[in-house]
Amino acid sequence: MTNENDDQPTNENDDQFILPGIPRRRFMGGASKLGLFVAAGGISAVAAACSSDDDESSSTTPGTDAPTTDAPTTDAPSDTTAATDAPAVTTPATPVSDEPIKVAIILPSTGPYAALGGMQARGIRLAMGDEIAGREIEYVDIEEPLFAPQDAIQLVQNNSDADVFVGVIGGNTALAIRDTIHDMEKPLLVTNAVTRAITGSRKSPYIWRASTTGYQAGVNLGPWMFENLGVSMDTAAPDYASGHELVDYPARFFEESGGEVIGQFFPPLGNADYAAVLTEMASSSSVFVYSFFAGGDAIRYVTQYAEFIGVDEKQLCGLTLVDDLTLVEQGDAAEGVMTLGGWNQAIDTPQNAEFMSAFEDAYGELPNSYANSGNNGGTILRMAIESINGDVENAELFSAAIGDVEFTNLLGTDFRFDKETHNAISFQTLDQIQRLDDGSLGFVQIAELGEAVDPGDDVAP
């Protein structure tokens, strides 16, 4: 496994991939389903539609492109609250300060993960709104430099007046800015990056992770794959820190259960053609394939997998291979693919129905799982700020308040942090893309994998 501190994406292709809005489709209804825990709080009222004008309070850092519509710079809808079961917070009429709370969102709006970044940014803004604890919320968008993570250090330093940083798609980015965030003594809430070190050997009292880790992705799934899919597998993921972790840990726990990893493939991030990888997989002696790809990469990989191999020949299982919006592009190629369960549009809970309606009203399109991740982060920050009456200038108090947040997420499960590691604790399921009664494709839960807790030991797989 490549050292996660040095591992960087090797492809400089920055063609933008932005998924368009889609009409509402029918999915599997019925009882509430549990999924991989990427939590999000409920929306108490339908949000007003966002303006297309630029937010005058937002800014971009030197040398970066301005956010596109995937990272809106409009004011967020203001009529939002945290989950309905959260403790009531009474905010005094007089806020602790008249100054706005500056929230710096670190996400990409260009490149292979543009759609992911855009959806997360929308989710953050929807949950936080434009005022908390009597203080205006001022957003600044920092373009995450996925292919040059060290550049993120200067971008963060340029926004040292921010009260909190949130987002981060790439593990390389998280690792690059860790020391800067720690030295600045400003909270960072990670909503996506899985790299273990930032909550392990390089843990900081100011950094919390609301997403899962590579360890959590593998600890339950690895043994399940050995027991249910076969004794040998190939793996594939983009060649960067998070990509390695999200296949290496499942591979580790698969091997510890008695399985054998035949081949591991790491094509560049943003790769357009997987023919060479898939041709080698097709001739491999492996029984099945485990992979991690997301966004545009997932669309291309899953589509080409169906052409070169197919799930009938070798089952394809993985993480973020399919979500509601990629499924539109993948179509029949996604049928039969197994994906570590998470949020999807078919989750049948009242809070999810509120979220779906509010998101569509605000942005004119339906959310995907990354919007849910962003909404999770925004909900956590809103609840933390409310609990300290907006006193975000007290960074230690603010950071501790983030760790104290608990609520019921859109999946109907309870969100909480592990106070020791600063990681979210996840409850995992496995979904499969199946043909539903109405003929459409949708997510069907096929297994409950249980709770996953990262011990924070930061031991390499």
Image (spheres, rainbow, N blue to C red):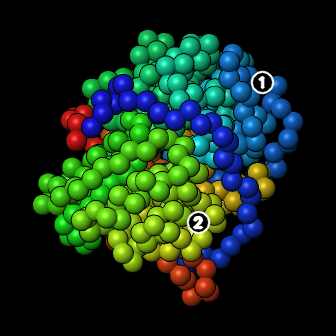
Residue 290: x and y, percent?
34, 59
Image quarter hosting the N terminus: top left
Going 71% across and 27% down the picture, which residue do you hit? 65
Kindly identify which residue carries mark 1. Answer: 57
Q: Nearer the viewer, residue 398 or 289?
A: 289
Task: Report the side of 142 relative to 269 (left or right).
Answer: right
Find numbered disc 1 in the image and state the secondary structure of the residue it sits on. Answer: loop
Going 62% across and 13% down the picture, which residue do you hit? 158
Residue type at mark 1?
Ser
Splitting the image into 4 quarters, where does residue 157 fall? top right
Task: Report the side of 306 relative to 248 (left or right).
Answer: right
* Sequence order check, earlier mark of 1 and 2: 1
Mark linked to residue 399: none
Kindly identify which residue carries mark 2. Answer: 330
Instruction: Residue 226: tell me if it is visible.
Output: no
Residue type at mark 2?
Gln
Going 30% across and 33% down the picture, which residue do you hit? 2
Task: Report the side of 63 relative to 457 (left or right).
Answer: right
Find numbered disc 2 in the image and state the secondary structure of the residue it sits on. Answer: helix
